[in-house]
Amino acid sequence: MLGSFDSSSHDDDDEEEPPPPPPNAYIHQTHHRSLAPPPVHTRQLLISCAELVSRSDISAAHRLITVLATNSSPLGDSAERVVHQFTRALSLRLDFLMNPNPAATTAASSQDLGSNDDALVQSSYLSLNQVTPFVRFCHLTANQAILEAIDGQEAIHILDFDIMHGVQWPPLLQAVAERYPPPTLRITATGSDLEILRRTGDRLARFAHSLSLRFQFHPLILLSNQDPISITSVLLRPDETLAVNCVNYLHRLLKDCNLLLLFLQRIKAMSPRVLTVADHNLPIFRQQRFVEALDHYAAVFDSLEATLPPNSPERLAVEQIWFGREIAGIVTGNDGEEGTARKIHVMGGDGKVRRLQ
């Protein structure tokens, strides 16, 4: 529950809360779970560990990571699970600091996060869509904006960045098919796996055919390490109304503000009728604050605990693969892309802001 990370809850309003322990207070308790620090202190240890990493104090950071790893678990309560993910991410950050070979470190982190198995990532995304309202709400809001913008148009073109499995589009296809006369609809979808794009296009084409909707699907390979500005292969037709969809996509460009600006300028040059942006973790990446990321994912993991049993395969997949990769991307500054590094800021107990670098 959210209170597991809330230091302001009291059984007695007049009782003063004890001060948080110093960073090394629990270092000698790593072999005794019965002496584990309470959740509020575990949270403080995470922040202290991030401070040590930001100062490149590798030895002290390793000791705190050992404490945190001992007192967290991917199968515990929501507090333990989120601590486990952030501890793993901080450990990867230390590996980046110590290993002079970026390629080897990137390969090791990819193996640890399971990113070498794209099927696992795709499966965890489907689980996320099934067990949480986050993705579905983004899709619903974006679809509503698109439907309002294309009202009365005879030919519609949607450019969707990273379509994944295309779960956003069946409701929109159905809504478009109910209009009279029904317009034509074409989707250009980007992704990194051509086979997944083709299967997604086939499913959407079959569904559109069942609705008697004139539909076309064009896959467009856009790799994660490829400049997203170079999307010159997008076919634009003068008789079509263009809608550009960016759901859970723009945060990938925030490693370089100039890249994001160029991307938006390129989209503006296409003259779309509407640009939809929905990104549940966009504020975290923009503000680059470790503590805000920790509090955000603590709330997310609390919501999963409130709705799913502890051993739910869907919950484990969402927490360990999907959110685990997001957390690692925030803390390591790697965000799943080779050779990229973002500077992450953490505010220490002394009020000073330091960079995780």
Image (spheres, rainbow, N blue to C red):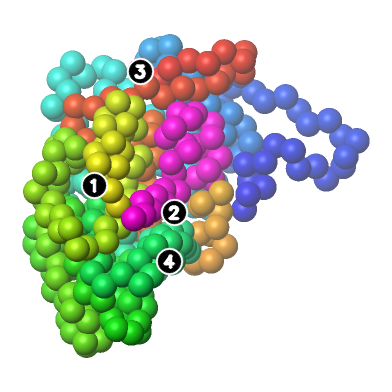
For residue 75, which numbered disc appears in the image?
2
Mark 2 vs mark 4, foreground winner is 4
Query: In front here: 230 or 164?
Result: 230
**Relative to 47, is 181 on the left or the right?**
left
Q: How far apart are marks 3 and 4 (CA)?
A: 44 Å
Between circles 3 and 2, the one closer to the viewer is: 3
Tell me which label, 3 or 2, sits earlier in the chain: 2
Question: Residue 84 at what x, y percent from top left?
Answer: 43, 41
Q: Which of 323 and 31 is in front in this view?
A: 323
The alpha-carbon separation of the residues under discs 1 and 4 comes to 19 Å
Q: Is residue 226 positioned above or below 300 on the image?
A: above
Is the residue under label 4 in contact with that under label 3 (CB below 8 Å)?
A: no
Q: Distance from label 1 to label 2 (Cα)?
A: 47 Å
- Residue at disc 2, secondary structure: loop
Within 10 Å of the Cα at label 1, are there few (<14), some (14-19), or many (20+) other Cα atoms? some
Which one is earlier in the sequence, the residue at label 3 or at label 1?
1
Residue annotated with mark 3:
357
Q: Residue 201 carries which label?
A: none
Q: Mark 1 vs mark 4: which is more N-terminal?
A: 4
Q: Which quarter of the figure has residue 317?
A: bottom left
Type of amino acid under label 1: Met
Q: Distance between the residues labelled 2 and 4?
A: 44 Å
| Separation of residues labelled 3 and 1 (CA atoms) | 37 Å
Q: Which amino acid does label 3 sit on?
A: Gln
Q: Give the range drawn in magenta.
A: 273-298
Q: Can residue 160 be seen in this view?
A: yes
Describe the element under mark 4 as helix, strand or loop: helix
User: Under tag 1, what secondary structure?
Assistant: loop
